[in-house]
């Protein structure tokens, strides 16, 4: 693929222009970038759009086959939905349409309710598309664009890897010419294949292998050429030659059949409550996954184009595109990584490239659709094998396995759930597990003991069990938010520390690592301060962030804890707390770790083990 042309001279953000009220920009967001459409940019966009229209032709047919839909529906999903998503989204380069992930979820969800390819199946797919569109639009209008950030990357990697195996398993019968019952699990498909090796159709298998080999060869030796198109053409020519020489009755090579040529017809989803109830869990799962895919791709390309992405606007664009798709014979559409990346590399400057791709696809279909009558199912199966192999992100899988056991667990749950459960439940299980692990981490903030280190010039405070501690003061740094889920863990940690050193009734907490305190956390601080005060000690907070402290002030919690117990500096805090210590304990203390200890009883002339460095009493960080 040729290198991307240099960006146009226009700035990344053009002025909105006079006479454009905010409400109009909300209704017609494409007016924000419309002034970027210059003759130069328009020419680049049209070329990129033509490239995208050619590429989506084999992909659309392949993805529709994965979804169990008639092949033309994959092309329809790349027409109107792609145009709507481009005009009402926020990305300059995102191209929406049918994708592998959405297709495999559609098939897994709907195949239990109707025969793939049947009228009932298509009607259910249209209904699912409508529900996904409504959910996406509602989430965008509710400003919930940040929700996709909570779907772990490991969920996406695990799901797509599992989907790759399912795609390959579903095409085994077409690749080898076997009669395998619909609805079998992957292990059952493999078992059936092994038990019926002698029944393989050599002509069908030969066409499949030749198509697969041709696609791999073109992809390796001519990476700039659309390998799917080359493989389809090559497989079709081989199948046509065999059928002409030996006859279809001898070869058994079946073809996809001619596709309808023209605009996508109007369609009508099923609005019955029973259908909506059946599809509700799948609609939610597909919505979350589709939005994650679209926004992730948009953000990735935006980073390279120095563009800002509005996640909520992207939700709205995706929602409107699926609403339109439900009534224009499309099924669930979302952002396509392959086509979006190609669009960027082809030099697209504005979303008009994606609009052009959707419009030009109509013309491409009119010209090419009749030729699908020569496309053998075995060749399509080989193409889908290539698609499946490309879905597995081996680099990401290796990194996850090496880096994190918890993320490995999320990857494994999603992967095996995809293989052996319904896909929507696999996605939900992965999402819930990743959220659970996240909550487990955030509910266990680190409470680190700190002591002054005499080996450093500034007596920096460090975590070193071998260094002495003050017998009356416990210094700790809290790293993490103090909210309802973390309160019990912090309380148990403090209890263990208190059991180990019961004389340390004064607790100084370095609060620079606290980003959030909710009502439960504030109540805990009040209870801890009150209890320690009753026992002759106290609770003190150093450098509590203003944004964290203000809610405590408004709620009256600071007054209960005592404003005098909140300090902006470490030296001030140490000096104040040391002055409140029990002099009898200080008289027999040999630790003397603070500079202020020199003024306490029993220190003597040599009791000051500190230094004249101004930070000697307070490097609590």
Image: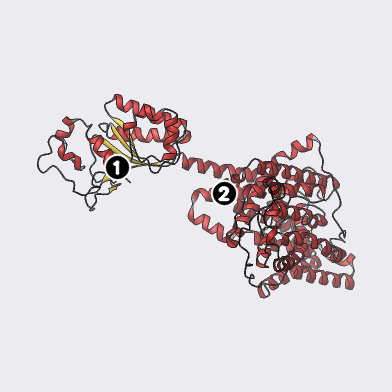
Relative to 539, residue 411 above or below: below
Please indicate, yes or no, whether residue 222 appears anywhere in the rendered image: yes
Q: Nearer the viewer, mark 2 or mark 1?
A: 1
Which mark is drawn over residue 570? 1
Please indicate, yes or no, whether residue 419 appears anywhere in the rendered image: no
Task: Classify residue 390 as left or right of residue 607.
Answer: right
Relative to 363, residue 565 above or below: above
Q: Can you tell which quarter of the image residue 64 is in?
A: bottom right
Task: Classify residue 366 as left or right of residue 464.
Answer: right
Task: Classify residue 80 as left or right of residue 425.
Answer: right
Q: Residues within 10 Å of mark 2 (few under 14, many from 20)?
A: many
Q: Are marks 2 and 1 in contact (CB under 8 Å)?
A: no
- Indicate the position of residue 261 as horizontal and vertical percent values: 87, 60
Q: Sequence-wise, which precedes: disc 2 or disc 1?
A: 2
Tell me the CA gap for discs 2 and 1: 39 Å
Residue assigned mark 2: 152
Residue at 72 percent across and 50 percent down: it is 28
- Indicate the position of residue 341 as horizontal and vertical percent values: 65, 63
Query: Which one is nearer the viewer's eye here, 551 or 494?
Result: 551
- Indicate the position of residue 486 as horizontal and vertical percent values: 45, 36
**The N terminus lies in quadrant:** bottom right
Query: Which one is nearer the viewer's eye here, 425 or 296?
Result: 296
Task: Classify residue 376 as left or right of residue 185.
Answer: right
Task: Give SS at disc 1.
Answer: helix
Relative to 259, residue 523 above or below: above
Query: Which one is nearer the viewer's eye here, 563 or 337?
Result: 563
Task: Give SS at disc 2.
Answer: loop
The residue furthest bottom is 221
Q: Can you tell which quarter of the image residue 132 is in?
A: top right
């Amino acid at each position: 693929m040729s290198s991307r042309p240099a960006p146009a001279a226009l700035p990344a953000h053009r002025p909105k222009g006079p006479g454009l009220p905010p409400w109009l920009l909300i209704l017609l967001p494409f007016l924000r970038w419309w002034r970027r459409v210059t003759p130069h940019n328009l020419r680049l966009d049209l070329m990129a759009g033509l490239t995208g229209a050619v590429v989506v032709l084999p992909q659309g047919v392949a993805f529709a086959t994965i979804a169990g839909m008639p092949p033309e529906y994959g092309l329809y999903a790349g027409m109107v939905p792609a145009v709507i998503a481009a005009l009402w989204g926020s990305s300059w380069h995102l191209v929406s349409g049918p994708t592998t992930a959405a297709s495999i979820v559609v098939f897994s969800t709907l195949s239990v309710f109707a025969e793939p390819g049947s009228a009932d199946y298509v009607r259910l797919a249209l209904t699912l598309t409508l529900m996904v569109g409504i959910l996406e639009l509602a989430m965008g209008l509710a400003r919930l664009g940040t929700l996709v950030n909570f779907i772990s990357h490991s969920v996406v990697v695990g799901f797509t890897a599992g989907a790759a195996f399912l795609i390959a398993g579903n095409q085994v019968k077409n690749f080898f010419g076997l009669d395998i019952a619909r609805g079998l699990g992957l292990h059952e498909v493999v078992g059936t294949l092994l038990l019926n090796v002698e029944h393989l159709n050599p002509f069908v298998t030969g066409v499949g292998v030749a198509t697969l080999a041709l696609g791999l060869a073109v992809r390796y030796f001519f990476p700039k050429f659309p390998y799917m198109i080359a493989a389809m053409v090559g497989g079709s020519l081989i199948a046509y030659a065999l059928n002409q020489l030996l006859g279809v009755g001898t070869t058994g090579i079946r073809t996809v059949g001619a596709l309808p040529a023209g605009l996508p017809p109007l369609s009508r989803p099923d609005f019955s409550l029973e259908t909506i109830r059946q599809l509700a869990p799948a609609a939610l799962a597909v919505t979350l996954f589709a939005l994650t895919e679209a926004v992730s791709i948009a953000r990735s390309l935006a980073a390279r184009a120095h563009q800002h992405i509005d996640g909520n606007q992207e939700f709205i664009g995706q929602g409107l595109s699926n609403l339109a798709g439900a009534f224009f014979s499309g099924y669930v559409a979302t952002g396509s990584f392959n086509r979006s990346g190609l669009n960027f590399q082809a030099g697209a400057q504005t979303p008009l490239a994606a609009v052009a791709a959707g419009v030009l696809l109509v013309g491409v279909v009119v010209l090419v659709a009749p030729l699908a009558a020569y496309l053998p199912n075995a060749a399509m199966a080989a193409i889908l094998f290539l698609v499946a192999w490309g879905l597995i992100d081996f680099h990401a899988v290796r990194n996850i396995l090496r880096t994190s056991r918890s993320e490995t667990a999320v990857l494994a749950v999603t992967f095996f759930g995809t293989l052996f459960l319904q896909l929507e439940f696999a996605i939900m299980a992965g999402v819930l597990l990743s959220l659970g692990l996240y909550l487990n981490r955030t509910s266990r903030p680190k409470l680190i003991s700190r002591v002054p280190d005499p080996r450093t010039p500034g007596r920096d405070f460090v975590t070193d069990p071998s260094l002495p501690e003050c017998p009356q003061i416990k210094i700790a740094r809290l790293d993490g938010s103090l909210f309802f889920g973390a309160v019990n863990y912090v309380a148990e940690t403090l209890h263990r520390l208190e059991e180990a050193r019961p004389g340390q009734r004064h607790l100084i907490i370095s609060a620079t690592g606290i980003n959030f305190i909710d009502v439960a956390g504030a109540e805990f601080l009040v209870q801890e301060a009150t209890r320690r005060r009753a026992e002759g000690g106290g609770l003190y907070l150093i450098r509590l962030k203003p944004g964290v402290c203000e809610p405590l002030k408004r709620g009256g919690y600071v007054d209960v804890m005592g404003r005098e117990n909140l300090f902006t500096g470490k030296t001030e805090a140490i000096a104040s707390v040391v002055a409140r210590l029990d002099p009898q304990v200080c008289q027999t203390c040999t630790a003397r770790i603070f500079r202020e200890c020199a003024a306490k009883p029993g220190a003597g002339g040599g009791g000051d083990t500190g230094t004249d460095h101004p930070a000697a009493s307070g490097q609590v960080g």
